[in-house]
Structure formats: structure tokens, C-alpha cells
Image (cartoon, rainbow, N blue to C red):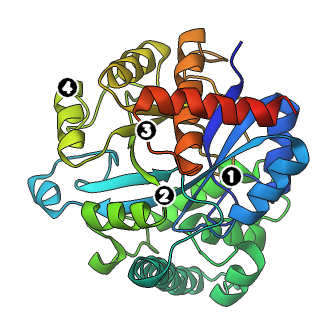
Amino acid sequence: MVPDVNAHIHTPYSFSAFGSIAEALDKAAAEGVRIVGINDFYSTDGFREWHDGCAERRLYPLYGIEFMALDTGMQAAGLRVNDPGNPGRIYLSGKGLAYPPVLSGAPARELARVRGEANAQTARMCEKLNAYLRSEGQAAQLDFDEIKSRLTRGLVRERHLAKALRLALYPDSEDPAALENELRSRLLKAGGPAFVPEEPDAFLPVVSVQGIIEAAGGITTYPFLGDNAKGGFTDFECDLQKAADQLRALGIRSAEFITTRNSTAVLEQYAGYLEDEGFIVSFGSEHNTPAMEPLRLRTRDSAALSDKLLATGYRGACAIAAHQAGLRLPREAMIEEGDKLIQKVLSA
């Protein structure tokens, strides 16, 4: 029986359901998830804490990062990639980054610039939110610097604003996660009174994201959105063969899925096809909303992954583990070597 893997978990270094990395790793250990991957937006700052916490609990750590990129051609054509609401916007992950982190020079400066742009956009949103509250006769006002200091590890997301507003207005809410989601949807998303669109400088082109990931020692990975609750797909993903060909043309040979988004049938179809096509395939849960859900992976229509999917996810984790250990071999050899690395830790 292969170990349970969750290769995509957000922590408080971006936004997370967890209050701390220790809480996330305690939950993983309690659920029997032995291979765990940190995957924060624009940040490797949590890597040391992740490494040390995994060592304490005899978990195998994977190191990742996430970006939002923009393809202006797809945007102009109205083509949705893996963001269903924003044509041309592309989420990309880096898997198997080096530990300790090695990013320096121009790639590190570019990453810092994008983080700064993201915070600047959220600060403008905070200002608009305060103006809206005043117009509604609300005495509550949010302090961006206080939110950054009290609720974040340096990167302020719109979910942090929703949390701060919920704490200010409804500190004793019986369902804080649902309320924060409602506040974010009504006030901070497109069409809401505090919405502020990102500036173009907040996004990098795909090739620049690839450059940062590779400079950090990682594998550029495309997160498939897959089928939604109505069985629909984005423009980019509806033709799986075409999507795989386009990713290969970009030099991307790794894919991941957030499994609760997808039906078991579609996840097995897409993951199986991509693995047969030579892609590294990994799975995760994100946990980048206020809702606390299991870390042990499941699909939209099943409480657990099938044996087929468990095996696929483990092979992907093995390849990522070998890559972050510095090995550069054909995929099957990476899986074999990564299995040795993982089993050495898990059997200790």
C-alpha cells in the first residue's frame, strides 16, 4: 500500500485554513498523510519551518511555490486557461524546489517585485473597503499595516481583508469560514464596492515564471482545473490532447490537480492520460480558504482517492522528491530513486 500524499498545501505564509505550519503538519500526521508539500503564493519563506516540522513528525517534505501568470494573447482572445473567471490568467506552480532555498540575483528581485505589487493592490482594496464602510455608516475601519502584522507573514491577500472585516464586525460568528467567503464575494471580488483590479505589473508572463521556478531549482507545473460541478471545462483544458501538446511546447512536463474540484472519473482520465504522455502528475488540497477540510485527499464524489489515483500521486511525489534532491534522470528512474529517498525517511 502506497503512502498518502498531499503535494499542495498553503500555509500562513500566503493564506491558509491553518493558523500555523505546526497545525497543518499535526493534522497531516493525525490523518496518516506522510508526504506533504508546502505550496505558498510567491514565497519560500516557510520552507525552513516546514522542513523542521516534517523532521519532528517523520513526514517527507516537498517544497513548492505558486504564481499567477498572464498570457496577453489569450486574454485578448477571451480564452480561459485555469482561472474560470479571468481569460488569459494562468496559475503555475513550482515543484521540487531546492532546500535550503537558492533563489538569488535577478530572479529573487523579480519575485520580490511581484510580491510588492500584490501587496500594493491589496492595500488599495483596503482603502476602498474603508471608504465603503464609512459610506454605510459603519464605524469599523481596517488598518492595512496592522492586518499585515497580525494576520499574515508578509503577503496580504484579499482573504486576509475578509478575515479582518469579519473579526471587526462579527467576531462571534458561528460559521466564520462561510461568512468570510460571503464578505469576500460581495465586497472584494469583481463587481464589489471594494474591488480593485490588479495592475498589469502584478503578473508575469509564463516564461518569466518558468525562469524564477527553474532558478529556484524547481519543476514548472501546470495546475489543471478539470471539470467543474456541472461537468464543464475551460477553453484551454476541454481538449486534453491539445492542452498537453501546448504545455509540452512551453517546456512544461508536470501537472497537478486539486482533487476535490474533480469527479473521480475525470481525474482518473486526465491524470492517467497525462502520465501516459510522460508528465509528472501530483495531487493536493490547497487549503487556501478559511474552511478546514481533511488533508487526506478525496475527489468531489468520493471520500477517498481510488487505488489508481493513490498510485499516480505517489509516483509523482517520488519524481518530485528525486528532483529536489538534485537528481536529473529520466522520469521512471526519478520515480525509482525518489521512492528510495521517501521510504528511507518514512521507515526510520
Picture coordinates of residue 315 (x, y %)? 54, 26
- Residue 329 is labelled as 3
Instruction: Examine the rendering and report whether any part of residue 242 can be seen.
Output: yes
Q: Is residue 149 above or below residue 306?
A: below
Q: Is residue 107 above or below residue 260?
A: below
Residue positioned 63% across, 28% down in the render:
339
Q: Amino acid at mark 2?
A: Glu
- Mark 4 and mark 3 residues within 8 Å of each other at the beta carbon: no
At x 81%, y 28%, the residue is 32
Disc 2/disc 1 C-alpha distance (Å): 18 Å
Q: Which mark is residue 241?
A: 4
Lower sequence index among marks 2 and 1: 2
Q: Position of residue 209 (x, y in %)?
A: 35, 64
Mark nearest the camera among 2 and 1 is 2
Residue where numbered disc 1 is placed: 290
Q: Nearer the viewer, residue 341 or 251?
A: 341
Upstream in sequence: badge 2 or badge 3:
2
Contact between marks 2 and 3 (CB within 8 A): the answer is no
Q: Which of label 2 and label 3 is nearer to you?
A: 3
